[in-house]
Image (cartoon, grey):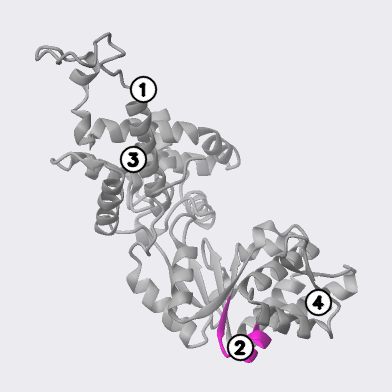
Amino acid sequence: MVVNPFRPQQLLGRQSALQQVSQILADDGDLLLAGVPGSGRRTLLRHASRTVGARVVEIDCLRATDSNRFLQLLTEGIVTAFQPPAELALIQQWSQEQPIILDMTPNGQARLIWHPTPKNEWVLFQSLLALPQVMAEWLNCRVVMVFLNFSHIRSWDRSEKWQSYLRQEIQQQTQVSYALIATVAESWVQASDVKVILLGPLEDAELRSWLVSALAAEGLQFEPDGQALELFLTYVQGHVGDAIALARRLWLDHRAFEESRPTVNDLGFEPSLPKRKDFTPALEAQEPPLKAHMIYPHHVYRSTLALVEDLSLTFESLILLLPPSQVRVLESLALDPTDSPHSRDYIQKHQLSRGGGLQGALASLEQKGLVYGPDYGYRITMPLLAFWLKYHLA
């Protein structure tokens, strides 16, 4: 696997949000970072945690298929956050009065193990949620409990017993901040003291400087007219994840071309012979001089097309899971972006359902993280999906 040199080492944009999140954590607050996948939610939270000197315990609820698996992920996150031997010794001390054992694997990795039963799972869950507070008090530090895909707990916690207890703990612990990462804020969050911060697309100016420097580090640059750079920004529409993926694809395509480009020896010339002035291979006539490593608009288009074709199976599977009314809205927005999908002219032009049907489709697509709401003009949140839809429909 080729390493991706385009993953930013520093926080890309989001300085205002970084200040907000850092202040919330410093004040022992709890928050929900809302935004679509690829918007930089986890990266922002990690930077904010480092800013306030907090330990981070991460749990991806999407990986939890039942209560026992959830406890495994919770213990893994806690042990990862407290790795030094002295801190593991504190966890060992804590475990003496719990139905759990701190064990070391043959390769020297610490882990918490227990014999699962329905009764001790619930007791252990309560104890484990209290453990970060205990460690924070012993070590005089702050801890951030990060729950990704928090709502997925309901897939196995049908009575919402576990999720209700988690909500209760969010309000009570004093040296532990809870940070939920989700696509949108659910109603219970709006009614709580949890602060909600929405991450929308980045401004082009924030992406532009990073993109130019990141490509330059790999020996690539956009042509002087700036059309290729603007086309790139148009295709990614401020989506950090798509910008990273497309930059990497441009780089890989350039490498592949360099490796396959005919050399003088390939064309039958002796390396000691001077090159004739009138000799210009066909490939050199079609492409700019390769020594400049320039990126032109057609390079951006080709790489974007190749990238979305690689993703086409994922996109097709996604479309098949949606009701026809929502697919129709997505197709309309891809072909004809608008800030006013409710207007009569737009509804008639694209033969959309009127009234509640259209509003319900938009609301559902927003809840799924596929369409931005009115704050961002009802855009498709995944620019590469929009490109793929437009390409196949046009």
Q: Which label is found at residue 260? A: 1
User: Mark 1 or mark 3: which comes first in sequence?
Assistant: 1
Q: CA distance from mark 3 to mark 4?
A: 53 Å
Q: Residue at x 54, y 66 (%)?
A: 181
Q: CA distance from mark 1 to mark 2?
A: 57 Å
Comparing marks 3 and 4, which lies closer to the viewer?
A: 4
Pick the residue in front: 203 or 258.
258
- Read off the residue under disc 4: 124
User: Mark 3 or mark 2: which comes first in sequence?
Assistant: 2
Q: Residue at x 51, y 51 (%)?
A: 365
- Read off the residue under disc 2: 139
Comparing marks 3 and 2, which lies closer to the viewer?
A: 2
Q: Residue furthest top?
A: 268
Comparing marks 4 and 1, which lies closer to the viewer?
A: 1
User: Mark 3 or mark 4: which comes first in sequence?
Assistant: 4
Mark 4–mark 1 CB contact (< 8 Å) = no
Return the x and y of residue 243 as percentages of the image width and height. 37, 48
Left or right of residue 21: residue 226: left
Image: magenta residue range: 132-144
- Read off the residue under disc 3: 336
